[in-house]
Amino acid sequence: MSSPLRLIAYFLATALALVALGATTASAARPLAKRLAAALRVEGIDPARTGSFVVDTESGQVVFSRNARRSLVPASTEKLTVALAALTVLGADYRVRTLVLGRGTQKGTAWKGHLVLKGFGDPSLHRDDLRALARQLARTGIRTVSGSVIGDESYFDASRTAPGWRPSFYKLWSPPLSALIVDRAVFRGSVVDEPAAAAARALKVELKSLGIKVRGRARVGRVNERRAVILGLVNSPSVEELVKFMNTESDNFVAETLLKLLGAQAGGQGSTAAGARVVTKVLREAGVSLTGVRIADGSGLSSLDRLTPRSVVELIRAARENPAVWRPFRASLAVAGRTGTLENRLRKRPSRGTVRGKTGTTNLASALSGIVGERYVFSIIMNGDAVPYWRARPAQDRFATILAGAA
């Protein structure tokens, strides 16, 4: 190529490079809020029923706000309210006990009376725990029991579901709610309707395997703990561990059980309604705006639940202000591209490992809320008569990725 042609080619290439650089710079310089707004535009989802709120924790400034005060169905974002309340009221180290009580007296190797398996709401109770209780009983020297094994689930009320649940949610999305439930009520390959009765039968089997003969049948009943002696005790994992499993895996049963436990411990009754009142009180005392907020259950399965994107961000920020709460609360959030419900989402940088969040999916809602590094707190809640999650999730991921790039 001749020298003039080389010069022309050089200047042309330089000009094209400058144009490309200018376009890239312009894109990078585009206001963050506009890029976030563009990320949420998605076919098939009504923008009027989509709310989002983002706060920069370094400056305290609102980065993005759209329908932030709108009352929306939160789906499993609801579990964040239970996490905050459980860690605040019960504490991260709290463990739920399960007891074997004796009503009667021991004479030599014989127990004259009944044995009571009393539950206090351990959602993780499993067959190994019953074996441990049976071994503790065997160490007392008891070899025969004249009465029955009684399963006592009276620490909670008798409701197996929560308000606003579809009938199909029962057993499919959560086992029956009970203060005494072993292996999530799965016995002989199916979920039973009466978990306390099944637990009593299972303990009787474990006792028999250790040579302890129970003459009476296994049944359900209610026994005053103060009028009995403790013959065995096992503890659940800590509330910190339960909350982590609940949020990371979005487990409905743990959420509902913790809500009833909150009611029993601080609300006067082991019911969903009492637990909801405790959660509402914790939110109010934490400075979370309750306008547009309604706590109907713990899992977010209820169509009656309502949160606002602003209230979710305020909730997370309130958790950040209490170091004893924030460490386990933060650890409970799924990590983008790595754990739980975010394991297969946001798998590329800058989002991977940087975004931590709580997802939410029902036919009425799709949501993602959480933190981006240590800089941003955000919430996105999308509602509709039938939200297409396969479109909603990519929009949420775009939104979070933009924040991760700016963090």
Image: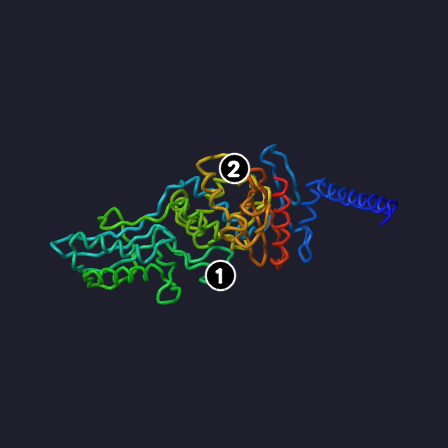
Residue 7, image x, y percentages: 85, 44
Amino acid type of the residue tagged 1 in the rendering? Phe
Label 1 packing within 10 angstroms: few (<14), some (14-19), many (20+): some
Which of the 4 quarters of the picture holds residue 403? top right
- The residue nearer to you, when weighing 57 against 130, is 57
SS class of the residue under badge 2? helix
Residue 174, image x, y percentages: 45, 58
Q: What is the residue that sits farthest to the right in this orientation?
A: 4
The residue wearing badge 2 is: 318
Label 2 packing within 10 angstroms: few (<14), some (14-19), many (20+): some
Residue at mark 1 to residue at mark 2: CA–CA distance: 32 Å
Amino acid type of the residue tagged 2 in the rendering? Ala
The residue shown at (44%, 52%) is 256
The residue wearing badge 1 is: 169
Residue 89, image x, y percentages: 42, 40
Vertical arrangement, residue 43 with respect to residue 324, above or below:
below
Residue 248, image x, y percentages: 48, 50
SS class of the residue under badge 1? helix
The residue shown at (36%, 59%) is 183
Numbered mark located on residue 202 in the image? none
- The residue nearer to you, when weighing 358 against 21, is 21
Direction from residue 90 to residue 40 in the image, left or right: right
Question: If the image is split into quadrants, where does the C terminus sit?
Answer: top right
